[in-house]
Structure formats: C-alpha cells, structure tokens
Amino acid sequence: LFSTLFNSIAIYTLRDSAEAALKFFKKAKKLLKVEDKYQGIIMNNIATLFYEQRQYRESYRYSEKALRIIEPLAFKMMKSTRETIETLKSNRIFIDLLMVLLVGYMNMGNSIRMILKVFPETELKDTNFMRFLKNGLKLCSRYLTDSHPLSKRFWNLI
C-alpha cells in the first residue's frame, strides 16, 4: 500500500500537479506511518513543483517542512563520533539523506530569492537566502565531488 501511494505521489509530481501529489501524501500519512526521510523527499518534490508553478510562498512553506524533517537526521549522522567524513562519503544512507537536504537548501534559497524579488517588503526581507545556497555548497564540497551535478548547480546559483 505504501509503495502504491508513494508511486502515485511520484507520478503526480512528474505531471507537475502539486495539489494532487499533496492530496496523495496526506492520504498516505493518514493510512501509514511514512518514514521521515520519505516525508522529506515528498515535501521537497512538492516544493519544487510549487516553485516551477511560480507559487513561491507555497514552495517556501514546503521547503521549510522538508528541512525541519531532514536536517536533524542528516546532522545527527554528521555529528556522530563513530563516523568520519570519509566513512560518511561511502555511507549510502547518509548520502541519500544529504541529497534530500541539499535539494531542500536549494528549494529554500531559490524560493526566498523569488519571494524577495516579487515582494520586497515581505516578512522574509531580513532572511538571507544565500545562506542556504552557501551552506549547500559547503556540504557539497565536504561530502561530494566538485563534478557532482548538485555541486555544479550550487556553484551556478551563487
């Protein structure tokens, strides 16, 4: 059942229907215990859809939700005394979490940038969107290669 709902969310995400993807996600949450990592992925995907539809405030909201879920999971692994940078680089679970975190930082930075462009006097006017992009680039530099697609995207955004 979970994989069917998750696949439905993915299909609606690919069809650029944030509202339908969100509806299926809410159903999945009611019916199942959806792991935090998957909730973060879904929130990032929905944030990306809203961004592409130029609904920047909604993109910001879902980026924020994704980061609230993913940041603690990823940083817990980074701060673990058992893991070194080198072991984390080869830890598939960590790299998957890192990818979700990086997409969240990218979504958040881009959403805030566009909100400030469209609404300069918004409540976010004191928010430094570049902080998210620079932090993403730092994490890319530490755990990925410079040739990684996400590293290149962060360099292009900064």
Image: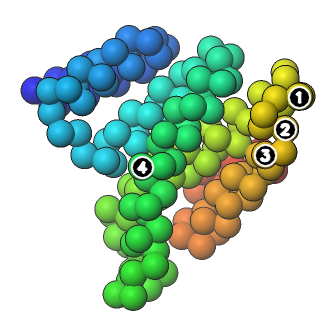
Disc 3 marks a residue whose amino acid type is: Thr
Q: Are marks 4 and 2 in contact (CB under 8 Å)?
A: no
- The residue that disc 4 covers is 69
Earlier-in-chain disc, 1 versus 4:
4
How many residues crowd mark 3 within 10 Å: few (<14), some (14–19), many (20+)?
A: few
Note whether residue 71 is visible.
yes
Sequence-wise first label, 4 or 2: 4
| Quarter that holds the N terminus | top left
Q: CA distance from mark 4 to mark 3?
A: 20 Å
The residue type indicated by label 1 comes to Glu
Q: Position of residue 120 (x, y in %)?
A: 89, 28
> Residue 113 appears at what percent x and percent y?
79, 35
Looking at marks 4 and 3 on the same chain, the residue that comes earlier in the sequence is marked by 4
Q: Nearer the viewer, residue 122 or 138?
A: 122
Answer yes or no: is residue 156 visible. Answer: no
Q: What is the distance, in whole Å, between disc 1 and disc 4 at their CAs?
A: 29 Å
The disc placed on residue 125 is: 2
Name the quadrant containing residue 57: top right
Which image quadrant is residue 112 in? top right
Residue 17 in the image: x percent, y percent?
46, 11
Q: Is residue 112 above or below residue 25?
A: below
Q: SS for tag 4?
A: helix
Other residues around mark 2 within 10 Å, as few (<14) / some (14–19) / many (≥20): some
Name the residue that disc number 1 marks: 121
Q: Are marks 1 and 3 in contact (CB under 8 Å)?
A: no
Three-letter code for the amino acid on which mark 4 is drawn: Ile
